[in-house]
Amino acid sequence: MATWSDVLPIVALLLYPIVAVAFLVYRLRIRKGRSVVARHSNGESVFRTDLGRFTVTRDRLIVESVRGSRRDVPLAEIRGLRYSHSTRPAFEELIYGLDLSDLSARWRDRIEWYAIAVVTTGDDVPMFIAGQLERRGPYMQWWFDWTERTLAALHLYNDVETRALSVLNQLRAAFRAAGRTLPLV
């Protein structure tokens, strides 16, 4: 008769891949980057993001931040859109464990951030920000790439770069519909 000490290692081995994939789904989700676009019949486009509500009309951009402040920016004051990408070290590196490969910047886990802002004559108006963990390792990169492709095929993984470019194109289309073609600055 089998005892718990005989069965437990087998159960742990069977459950490990399920737990690992569930953890990856949790960690690889879009950290921020919610965006909802609504187009109205009167020519207005409304963007709701994590940073607030933005309404593009024929003559102005109405900014309502999540903190409750409101600001009107005339379209004539808008110089363009800024699309930026940056990487930051991932705090999760401490959770996953440090090893010698982490001494090399090439193999350190990082968070890739994508941001979109409207550039005005006065200051920038941030409209969208999204970040995602990118796991890296010299011996495990194949695993990280495989899990990312598998989760994407199952529609459980949203690539943040693709998402940010989609939002950028939607913003450019909204400003074009309002009669203003904005360059990237």
Image: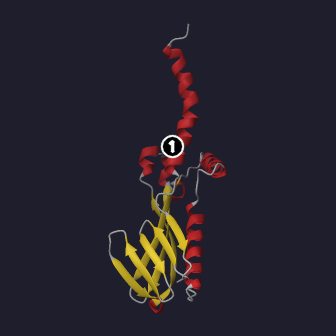
* Three-letter residue code for mark 1: Phe
Residue 30 percent location from the top left of the image = 51, 57
Judged from this view, the residue extending furthest toward the front is: 41
Q: Residue at x 62, y 52 (%)?
A: 155
Is residue 185 at all visible to an observer of this figure?
Answer: yes
Asked which colour scheme the image uses, the reply is secondary structure
Residue 158 percent location from the top left of the image = 58, 57
Near-viewer residue (110 or 69): 69
Is residue 97 at all visible to an observer of this figure?
Answer: no
Left or right: 119 as drawn, with respect to 25: left
Q: Residue at x 56, y 41 (%)?
A: 21
Near-viewer residue (85 or 138): 85
Q: Quadrant of residue 16?
A: top right
The residue pinned by badge 1 equals 23
Residue 25 percent location from the top left of the image = 54, 47
Q: How many marks?
A: 1
Q: From this view, report whether residue 180 is shown above or below residue 143.
A: below
Could you tell me which secondary element the residue under label 1 belongs to? helix
Near-viewer residue (52 or 92): 52
Query: Split into 4 quadrants, where in the image is the N terminus?
Result: top right
Judged from this view, the residue extending furthest toward the bottom is: 76
Q: Residue at x 57, y 65 (%)?
A: 163
Near-viewer residue (97 or 130): 130
Residue 122 percent location from the top left of the image = 38, 88
Q: Residues within 10 Å of mark 1 (few under 14, many from 20)?
A: few
